[in-house]
Amino acid sequence: MFLNQMTASDLLKRQWTTLGIIMDHLVNNAGIASVFFFEKSTDISKSLPVMDVNFWGSVYPTQFALPHLKKSKGKILVIASVSGWMYGTKISFYGASKAALLNFYDTLRVEFSSSVKITIASPGFTRTAMLRGKQLNMEGSVEINKSKTDAVLHSLPLRSASECAKAIVKGVCRGDRDVTDPSWYGIFYVLKFFIPEIMEMFLHRINIIPRNNMKKNVDVENISATSGIKMS
Ligand SMILES: NC(=O)c1ccc[n+]([C@@H]2O[C@H](COP(=O)([O-])OP(=O)(O)OC[C@H]3O[C@@H](n4cnc5c(N)ncnc54)[C@H](OP(=O)(O)O)[C@@H]3O)[C@@H](O)[C@H]2O)c1
């Protein structure tokens, strides 16, 4: 269920408070990918849910959880992405939504000081439904389209979801401000800073130039009727 203003309020104020549940962690994990060339999009409004889920879907729960987290000296974990700073082709909206998260929670750190700690996790490519091609297409429906992620699957080493989750939980327990998993993605951050043109060439190469031996998989399963974008 998408946590809009009312549902978040109901959950936190009615249920947790009256049941006496102490909230000491908020995990903002919900996310949806979108993978297409910006210039191919004919109706940008169809991509608004990417920002709704990835950015606003973290902001609303944060606002309603804040008084509880202040009381319990709790923590916020934000699942952002390396795509927030490592630009890739076809992920203009997805990357922008993650970049917005990074900036937003960096700003909240300044505002909260030590009252509520924030860990921002930036996973790299991880084997989950998202990398199996689950994404919001440019027509605005959620589908599983394996061909969308084939380029990634053939070019970079992938992390398992459990390895990634363990690294993130360890980071939160240590009180880390940021967790990049796997940590070797950090090299891209340095490269982007010092030699952005070479970094762009590299990303262009791994994402756009198709591999000769890559089998194109065009299976598309439209799942918007059952478990697509949830808005209430
Ligand atoms: N996989 C990667 O390579 C990768 C890399 C970097 C960052 N991330 C981030 O990791 C997080 C988890 O994604 P994942 O890789 O585990 O993919 P996933 O398996 O597709 O999980 C996405 C999660 O977001 C939830 N969600 C999607 N739309 C929602 C909505 N409108 N309202 C409420 N919940 C919604 C899904 O709930 P349902 O299952 O109920 O639909 C699911 O729990 C995301 O923020 C993603 O951006 C993933």
Image (spheres, rainbow, N blue to C red):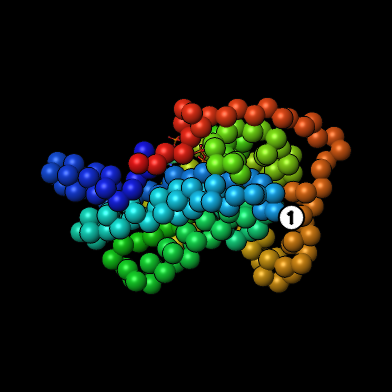
Tell whether 154 sits left or right of 132: right
Toward the front, the furthest residue is 42
Tell whether 162 sits left or right of 34: left
Residue at 41% across, 54% down: 56
Q: Position of residue 226 (x, y in %)?
A: 46, 27
Q: Measured along the vertical axis of the image, is residue 203 above or below residue 150?
A: below
Q: Measured along the vertical axis of the image, is residue 160 above or below residue 202?
A: above
Q: Nearer the viewer, residue 118 or 17?
A: 17
Q: Quadrant of residue 232?
A: top left
* Secondary element type, mark 1: helix
Q: Nearer the viewer, residue 37 or 129?
A: 37
- Residue type marked 1: Leu
Q: Is residue 25 visible?
A: no
Q: Position of residue 107 (x, y in %)?
A: 42, 69
Q: Measured along the vertical axis of the image, is residue 217 above or below residue 1?
A: above
Q: Measured along the vertical axis of the image, is residue 57 above or below residue 199?
A: above
> How many numbered marks have been drawn onto this rendered protein structure?
1
Q: Is residue 115 visible?
A: yes
Q: Position of residue 51 (x, y in %)?
A: 49, 53
Residue at 74% across, 48% down: 207
Q: What residue did someone put label 1 on?
A: 203
Q: Quadrant of residue 197?
A: bottom right
Toward the right, the furthest residue is 212
Residue at 44% across, 44% down: 30
Residue at 40% across, 50% down: 57
